[in-house]
Image (spheres, rainbow, N blue to C red):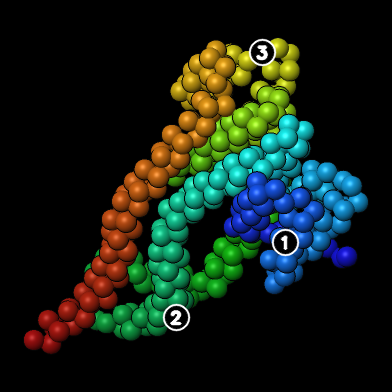
Amino acid sequence: MLLSAHPKIKTAEKIVITKHLSTMLKAGIPLEEAFFTLLEQNKKNSSLQKILTIVLEDIQNGQSLEKALKPFEYTFGALYVNLVKVSEESGTLEENLEYLSMHMEKASEVKKKVQAAMLYPIIVLLATFGVGGGVSLFVFPKLIDLFNSLDFELPATTKVLLWFAAIMRDYGVWIFLGGFLLMLLATVLYAKLTVFKKNIQDLMTKIPAVGPLALYAQLEQFCRNLGMLIKSGVPVDLALITTASTLSQLTFEARTTQIAKKIATGKKISEVMIEEKYGEFPVLISHMIAVGEKTGKLDDTLLYLADYYAQEIDSQTKNITTLLEPLLLLFVGLMVGFIALAVISPIYGITSQLR
């Protein structure tokens, strides 16, 4: 069966099939029959159906679920596959699949909140610059000859507008084309060049309002993924390595990998964080992890921290919307006001002379 090297399925689809699989296994349905049922339920989804078919064939051939999912690690994620492996070894597959579906739901909710917080300002700015760009290219240049023909001293605002209109008339197309090519180049570099991507991500964490949100999102993901893996019985070093692969920010991924290497020498996570003084991890995390390690409840501590940062993300997204909304309205209002003043002032001057 032909299938792309890295087939993709939606997060919502992964949540549903994981939840359904857990429910069927809890009801005593054999794994093979459960996957056959999932296959029947997803006939309309060709990509998911192909994946489930291959997994079912491997299970029928005597392979474990973890080995059957291994070729699709890019699709399901290293965390998913490793959790299934440990669950099969410990005989807790149905319970951990249910917990995994809950984890994915929470992670999806956090991601949606972050995206929603950024969507409003992006739409407003795109609309503003889109309309402004159209007016600058097609309307302003036509005002140059009109206002230059007026036989009186133009106001300063009108002169600034005419200067900008002249630039857009002579170089506007090249400016927009250059801007588009620059954005395209930045997108390609972000996707292909690790150093460039890391620098952009680090810069994003320093932007007011947006920075803390990006930081909290990574901390929530780190704590939730690591806590869930440890709770499921994954060794701490392997849990850290797996968690590192799930983090989107390269700096967090590198720090988590470094911690995994250092605890292999016998150190604890909190000791490494405190000794190395990683700026990405607040003091709260290292101290809480230390408490969890002493009490033997590291998994519960990490999951508590994950819920704490999920609440912080919720609060931060509301703050961003509250802060940006008046600022964006003020920005748009100032632009409209300046243009109106620049256009109306000379017209008012003409009517005054006629009187």
Q: Residue at x 79, y 43 (%)?
A: 66
The answer to whether one can see residue 173 in this image is yes
Amino acid beneath label 1: Thr
Q: Residue at x 30, y 61 (%)?
A: 329
The kind of secondary structure element at disc 1 is: helix
Front in this rendered view, residue 347 or 119: 119
Whether residue 300 sits left or right of residue 255 in the image: it is: left
Mark 3, residues whose alpha carbon is within 10 Å: few (<14), some, or many (≥20)? Answer: few
Mark 2, residues whose alpha carbon is within 10 Å: few (<14), some, or many (≥20)? Answer: some
Amino acid beneath label 3: Lys
Cα separation between marks 1 and 3 = 46 Å
Q: Residue at x 33, y 84 (%)?
A: 146
Front in this rendered view, residue 329 or 146: 329
Q: Residue 37 got which mark?
A: 1
Q: Residue 345 got which mark?
A: none
Residue 231 lies in quadrant: top right
Q: Quadrant of the N terminus?
A: bottom right
The kind of secondary structure element at disc 3 is: loop
Mark 1, residues whose alpha carbon is within 10 Å: few (<14), some, or many (≥20)? Answer: some
How many labels, in total?
Answer: 3
The kind of secondary structure element at disc 2 is: helix
Q: Residue 267 got which mark?
A: 3
Residue where numbered disc 2 is placed: 138
